[in-house]
Structure formats: structure tokens, C-alpha cells
């Protein structure tokens, strides 16, 4: 989880504002964690024992908090929003493919749904609610 956060912070702190430095890097961020999530998800669904249910109950809030944190890294949403804002222009000029435009749109929407446009208090409240669900 720490390396995923580091990947995202590197994007937020980057001086570059290109598709590759923001959205492509965002798409690649957390590759290690994705592998672990895949194994974890398969393991808990195929080995649904009381011990694994206990592990899942303990891990769920940690994973939820991590997810909330990934959408609240200072500067990251602004970069994603910037990419979404130039999407139409870039696609019209031929600089971006339709897939690139779709990625910009989907990432932006996910950030908004995860509370990126909320105030600090509302984001914390939302993360608390997500953590208890």
C-alpha cells in the first residue's frame, strides 16, 4: 500500500502535465498492490473459512482507508481534472485516441465519486463511512 501511495504522490508532485506523466502513470500506479489484491480476492473467495472471514473482517477497513487515501492525495485530483478538461481538444486535434479520452473521463468520474470535490470535513466523513461499511 505504501508503494501505491508513493506512485500516486510522484504523479501529484510531477512538474509534467502530459497524458503519459499523469493518466498513463496513474493507470500503472500500484502494480504490486494490484497483484496482491488479485491473490487476496481469489483466496478469500475460494477459501471461505471462519479464519479467512476473520482476516477479511480485519482487512476490509484497512483496504477501504487505503482506497480513500488514494483519492485524497493533494494535487492529484487537480492533475486528473486538468487532463479531463483538455480531453475534447486533444481528441479533436488527434493527439489522443478515443481510449485515452475515455481513460481521462473514467478516472475523473471515479475521483468525483470518491469525494474529490468535497471539502476536507466531508471527505473525512465519507472515508469514515466507507471504512465502517
Image (cartoon, rainbow, N blue to C red):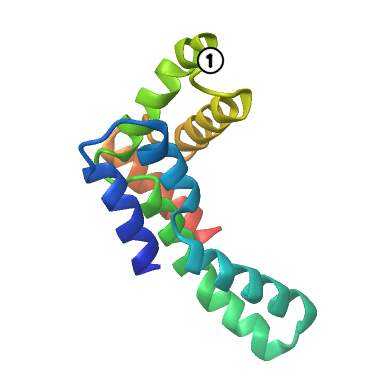
Q: How many other residues sit within 10 Å of disc 1, few (<14), some (14-19) or many (≥20)?
A: few
Instruction: Name the residue that disc number 1 marks.
Output: 94
Going by the picture, which residue comes out furthest to the bottom? 51
Quadrant of res 52:
bottom right
At 52% from the left and 74% from the top, the residue drawn is 59
At 51% from the left and 36% from the top, the residue drawn is 107
| Helix, strand or loop under label 1 | loop
Quadrant of res 6:
bottom left
**Can residue 118 be seen by looking at this rendering?**
no
At 62% from the left and 23% from the top, the residue drawn is 98
Q: Position of residue 122 (x, y in %)?
A: 34, 38
At 44% from the left and 38% from the top, the residue drawn is 23
Q: Position of residue 37 (x, y in %)?
A: 58, 68
107, above or below 6, in the image: above
Quadrant of res 54:
bottom right
Q: Position of residue 125 (x, y in %)?
A: 37, 46
The quadrant in which the N terminus is found is bottom left
The quadrant in which the C terminus is found is bottom right
Query: 60 or 19: nearer the eye?
Result: 19
22, above or below 83, in the image: below
Query: 107 or 127: nearer the eye?
Result: 107
Left or right? Give the position of 98 relative to 5: right
Amino acid at each position: 500500500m505504501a508503494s501505491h501511495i508513493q506512485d500516486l504522490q510522484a504523479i501529484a508532485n510531477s512538474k509534467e502535465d502530459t497524458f503519459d506523466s499523469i493518466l498513463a502513470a496513474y493507470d500503472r500506479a500500484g502494480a504490486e498492490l494490484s497483484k496482491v489484491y488479485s491473490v487476496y480476492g481469489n483466496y478469500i473467495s475460494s477459501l471461505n473459512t471462519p479464519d479467512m472471514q476473520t482476516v477479511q473482517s480485519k482487512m476490509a477497513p484497512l483496504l477501504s482507508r487505503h482506497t480513500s487515501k488514494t483519492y485524497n492525495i493533494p494535487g492529484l485530483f487537480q492533475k486528473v481534472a486538468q487532463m479531463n478538461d483538455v480531453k475534447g481538444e486533444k481528441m479533436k486535434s488527434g493527439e489522443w485516441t478515443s481510449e485515452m479520452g475515455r481513460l481521462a473521463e473514467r478516472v475523473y468520474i471515479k475521483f468525483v465519486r470518491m469525494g474529490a470535490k468535497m471539502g476536507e470535513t466531508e471527505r473525512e466523513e465519507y472515508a469514515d463511512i466507507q471504512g465502517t461499511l
